[in-house]
Amino acid sequence: MGVVRRTLLAGLLPAPVEVVEAFADPSAFELFPEERALMERAGSAERRREFATVRMCAHTAMLRLGVPAAPVLPCEEGADWARNAPRWPRGVVGAMTHCQGYRAAAVARGGAVASVGIDAEPHASLPTGVQHAVTSPEERRALAGLARSHPEAAWDRVLFSAKESVFKAWFPLTGRWLGFEDCEIALDADRGTFAAALRVPGPVVAGVRIDGFAGRWRILGRPGQGTVGTAVAVRAPAV
């Protein structure tokens, strides 16, 4: 896959998490037979490339973690929205993401990290009407303030990506849907961080109730030309 000198998500997660990212697809795909069978049913050539590359990122991350690489297959159980969630090997937690020109996987041992969520999006404002569908009035007021003070960023896309990362960290802990209205995101433009306050009862991990998530974000490139990345890691509580 070559050496990636740019980073989007690398460095946004704590040391127990291995992040592998790719800004281009390899010319040949090294997949497990089960993954290749799924890839061949993935539809378009672009969809097959992103499917393969993101799994190669996941395999590399597992090997760096000291875990034998294994197929990363969809759950294929439960509601329609849950069936494509990745099923990780026992003792491993992780997340994957892809968008145009970018693929990444983040993997950790379950004893150190309870859950991981990552997301990558094009650095562009959300399509018309989408912002109101995924944000609260309070979030929209905050976005307007950020647009005035820091006009160089597509803040609605950063917020959307943060909610996607939160959902990916939430779902393995709960097995439940988390709507856009179920968490409130506060972005810190200067520190590159965000806080997600849950509006519904949070998951219980090792007897500890989680009422919110903390994450980080990074932008590569100007609006219309770059990529937004967000990441969340839920530390495993000490027992």
Image (cartoon, rainbow, N blue to C red):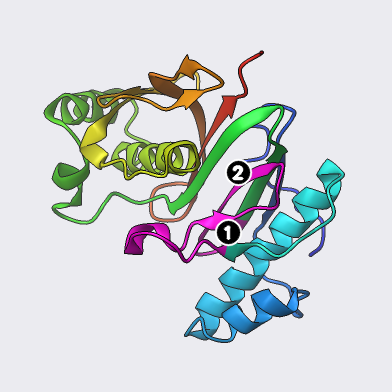
Precedes in sequence: disc 2 or disc 1? 2
Q: Is residue 66 above or below residue 34?
A: above
Which secondary structure, mark 2?
loop
Q: Is residue 99 above or below residue 216?
A: below
Q: State if disc 1 and disc 2 touch (CB < 8 Å).
A: yes
Q: Is residue 87 magenta?
A: yes
For the question of whether residue 153 can be seen, the reply is no
Residue under label 2, please give it. Answer: 8
Q: CA distance from mark 2 to mark 1?
A: 9 Å
* Mark 2 closeness class: few <14, some 14–19, many ≥20 residues within 10 Å: many
The amino acid marked with disc number 2 is Leu
Q: Quadrant of residue 53?
A: bottom right
Q: Is residue 124 above or below residue 28?
A: above
* Mark 1 closeness class: few <14, some 14–19, many ≥20 residues within 10 Å: many
- Chain part drawn in magenta: 74-103
Residue, x 44% and y 52% (percent of image)?
121
Residue, x 57% and y 70% (percent of image)?
50
Quadrant including the C terminus: top right
73 vs 224, left or right, is right
Q: Position of residue 196 (x, y in %)?
A: 37, 25
Residue, x 38% and y 39% (percent of image)?
158
Q: Which mark is residue 76?
A: none
For the question of whether residue 175 can be seen, the reply is yes
Q: Position of residue 208 (x, y in %)?
A: 49, 15
Residue, x 48% and y 36% (percent of image)?
173
